[in-house]
Image: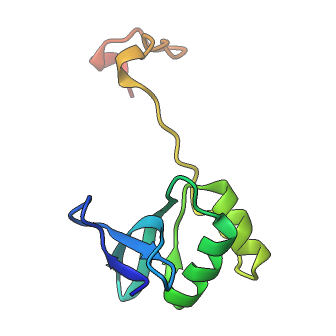
Amino acid sequence: MPLHPDPGASAGHLLSTADGTPLARLRLRDDDGERVAGEVTPLPGADVRVLAAQARRDLAGARLKTPDDALAAALVAGGLTLRRAATDMRHDLTDVPEPVPLPGDDGSPDARP
């Protein structure tokens, strides 16, 4: 079975080839009636072209989300349409610089409009 629960992640699934070779981890969910395969992440050593073909077969009709640019490119090369809804940006919160005062703001809560 190409799509099965991931024993290493309670809420996750594995996408595998027909012979059982694991290709990617993902999370299946329902988004207001639309099936979503989110966080599709290739496993180390997986060929993204094989993964893209398997995803097209086993996840047909689902919206697919992946942080992996190589997988996205392979999916587009196979005929899927790329849509980017957002750019996910992250910052290490242990190294946050001090806030810069805005013009006209002395920093006190009463000075803010």
Going by the picture, which residue comes out furthest to the front?
Answer: 19
The image quadrant where one finds the N terminus is bottom left
x, y percentage for residue 106? 41, 8
Going by the picture, which residue comes out furthest to the left?
Answer: 10
Going by the picture, which residue comes out furthest to the right?
Answer: 77
Residue at position x 52%, y 91% in the image: 61
Residue at position x 41%, y 67% in the image: 26
Compared with residue 16, is residue 6 higher up or lower down, i.e. above or below?
Answer: above
The answer to which of 88 and 79 lies nearer the viewer is: 79
x, y percentage for residue 56? 60, 84
Residue at position x 75%, y 80% in the image: 78
Residue at position x 35%, y 18% in the image: 94
x, y percentage for residue 40? 48, 65
x, y percentage for residue 75? 69, 73
User: 112 left or right of 62?
Assistant: left
The answer to which of 87 and 107 lies nearer the viewer is: 87
User: 59 left or right of 75?
Assistant: left
User: 49 left or right of 61?
Assistant: right
Q: How is the image coloured?
A: rainbow
Q: How many marks?
A: 0
The image quadrant where one finds the C terminus is top left
Q: Looking at the rendering, which quadrant does residue 15 occupy?
A: bottom left
Compared with residue 82, is residue 43 higher up or lower down, i.e. above or below?
Answer: above
Q: Looking at the rendering, which quadrant does residue 10 occupy?
A: bottom left
